[in-house]
Amino acid sequence: ETHDGKKKNESTWAIFRIHHQRSRYIYDLYYGRKAISRELYEYLLKEGYGDKNLIAKWKKAGYEKLCCLQCIQTRDTNYGTTC
């Protein structure tokens, strides 16, 4: 996709989507299906294949559908709100 005519934050949505999908896949493999070992899970997070902070939020009640940490950071918005 090109970023022509898009706002600054819209041009990064594809990156956030891929980042979310990869982290969610690792989360589902470890916590949902229990298909990978703890060692592999920790290795994937250590090497940056998944976002450990995002996964930590998914484990908390009410954050299961969170797409990215940017959505809950009020300091990055004009009026101190979330996206």
Image (cartoon, rainbow, N blue to C red):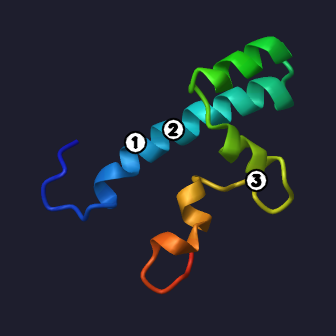
Amino acid type of the residue tagged 2 in the rendering: His
Q: Please determine whether, in this image, residue 2 is positioned above or below residue 36.
A: below
The residue carrying mark 2 is 19
Q: Residue at x 77, y 45 (%)?
A: 56
Give the mark nearest the N terminus, 2 or 3. Answer: 2
Instruction: Indicate the secondary structure of the residue bearing disc 1.
Output: helix
**Alpha-carbon span between mark 2 and mark 1:** 6 Å
Q: Which amino acid type corresponds to the residue marked 1 in the rendered image?
A: Ile
**Type of amino acid under label 3:** Glu
For mark 1, what is the residue? 15
Q: Pick the quarter of the image with the N terminus.
A: top left
User: Which label belongs to residue 64?
Assistant: 3
**Residue 56 bears which disc, if any?**
none
Residues at discs 2 and 1 in contact (Cβ within 8 Å):
yes
Q: Secondary structure at mark 2?
A: helix
From the top left corner, tell me how far across and down residue 64 is, in percent.
Answer: 76, 53
Category of crowding for the residue at label 1, using alpha-carbon neighbours closer than 10 angstroms: few (below 14), some (14–19), many (at least 20): few
Whether residue 9 sits left or right of residue 71 in the image: it is left
